């Protein structure tokens, strides 16, 4: 045995310690070199039988190798121990940076639809929904919109295979409800609607409406006016005024387009310093919905007696209501899933 052989043993042992992948493997290395019958132990035991001139150097090298190895083995044991507790998830390293939690929240459209429902439910209306994929009968024909009517234009409607359409408004839900329910009816129908509009700041091929239907004996136009005046004050604030203008819809007669006092200049009372109000163009009014008394032809298409019952209906764009109330300038924000927008609400 000479000094060089001791160093070779040490180097082999060091390589095996660093390569040990488990506590058991590491223990086997310890026993192989430092155990009772270990290679280094044997060297140390054999020192006394060496030539006296070799004893000093070999003894020194063997003792050094032993202490280096013992240190390395205990370091490696700690490493392996830490790795296994990390894997088991048992240890929490409080020095690591935290992991942020994303909290989900309601979309602004859902928040406001909920608010609209609460207002109408508070007035005695109940809520129902209908299918987004509708047949032509419910979307057009039963609503007194016969074939050839401009509202049926190919260019405005998404057609689906099998004579179906993506509903262009929520009015077909009126028909579905009246087909299955006798009067009286006092209901609202919120939902998505689809039109072949190109995207811009105020048009989207997909948007939301809230439809309202009230049918009973003796329902009159003043009932419609009172309902909408109350709604406008509840949704837009106490001072909000309502204006009815003559309009035309195939499914109502008479029909009206309904405006509220402008939420930007408060109906012209507080016009901006320079020029006309950007929101209403200086008129003081903003159109928010279409309304009217249910057309007798609509009642006939669902088998209601148009002599006995009257009713009012209206339909409003939820996206537009939100844009006016919150001062949002672009309808595309509602569908873009941009967290910088969505996180501001809810
Ligand atoms: N369906 C119409 C639209 O999409 C809105 C509407 C107008 C609904 C008058 C009604 C109504 O119920 O009576 O433009």
Image (cartoon, rainbow, N blue to C red):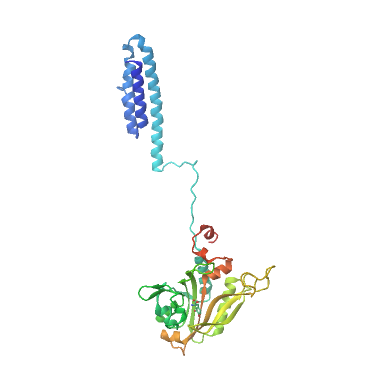
> As drawn, is 275 to the left or to the right of 302?
right
Can you name the residue that lies furthest to the left here?
A: 37
The residue sitting at 57% across, 80% down in the picture is: 226
Quadrant in the picture for residue 202: bottom right
Q: Residue furthest right?
A: 273
Query: How many numbered callouts?
Result: 0
Is residue 176 among what the camera can see?
no
Residue drawn 37% across the image and 15% down it: 59
In the image as oriented, which residue stretches furthest toward the top? 52
**Which image quarter is the N terminus in?**
top left
Left or right of residue 315: residue 242: right
- Residue for point 51% across, 59% down: 338
Residue at the farthest front position: 155
Provide residue 203's location: percent of width, then percent of height: 51, 69
Give the percent coordinates (x, y) of residue 148: 43, 82
Q: Is residue 230 above or below residue 20?
A: below
Q: Can you tell which quarter of the image residue 66 is in?
A: top left
Quick check: 326 left or right of 183? right
Could you say where residue 329 lies in the image, as x and y percent from the top left? Answer: 57, 66
Residue 151 seen in render = yes
The image shows residue 253 at horizontal and vertical percentages of 51, 85
């Amino acid at each position: 045995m000479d000094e060089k052989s001791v160093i070779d043993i040490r180097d082999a042992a060091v390589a095996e310690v660093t390569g040990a992948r488990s506590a058991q493997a590491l223990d086997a290395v310890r026993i192989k070199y430092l155990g009772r019958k270990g290679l280094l132990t044997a060297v140390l035991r054999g020192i006394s039988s060496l030539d006296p001139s070799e004893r000093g150097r070999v003894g020194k090298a063997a003792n050094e190798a032993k202490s280096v190895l013992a240190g390395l083995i205990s370091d490696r044991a700690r490493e392996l121990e830490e790795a296994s507790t990390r894997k088991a998830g048992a240890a929490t390293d409080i020095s690591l940076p935290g992991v942020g939690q994303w909290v989900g929240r309601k979309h602004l459209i859902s928040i406001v639809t909920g608010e609209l429902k609460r207002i109408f439910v508070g007035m005695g209306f109940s809520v129902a929904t209908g299918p987004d994929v509708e047949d032509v009968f419910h979307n057009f024909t039963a609503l007194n919109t016969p074939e050839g009517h401009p509202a049926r234009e190919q260019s405005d409607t998404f057609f689906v295979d099998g004579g179906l359409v993506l509903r262009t408004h929520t009015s077909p839900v009126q028909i579905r409800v009246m087909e299955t329910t006798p009067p009286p009816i006092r209901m609202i129908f919120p939902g998505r609607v689809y039109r072949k509009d190109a995207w811009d700041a105020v048009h989207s091929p997909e948007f939301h409406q809230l439809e309202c239907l009230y049918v009973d004996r003796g329902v009159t136009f003043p009932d419609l006016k009172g309902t909408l005046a109350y709604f406008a004050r509840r949704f837009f604030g106490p001072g909000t005024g309502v204006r009815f203008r003559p309009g035309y819809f195939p499914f109502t007669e008479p029909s009206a387009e309904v405006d509220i006092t402008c939420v930007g200049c408060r109906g012209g009372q507080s016009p901006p310093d320079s020029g006309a109000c950007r929101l209403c163009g200086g008129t003081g009014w903003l159109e928010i919905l279409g309304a009217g008394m249910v057309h007798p032809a609509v009642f006939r298409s669902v088998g209601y007696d148009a002599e006995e019952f009257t009713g009012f209906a209206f339909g409003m764009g939820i996206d537009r209501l939100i844009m006016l109330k919150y001062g949002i300038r672009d309808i595309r924000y509602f569908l873009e899933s941009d967290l910088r927008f969505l996180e501001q609400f809810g």
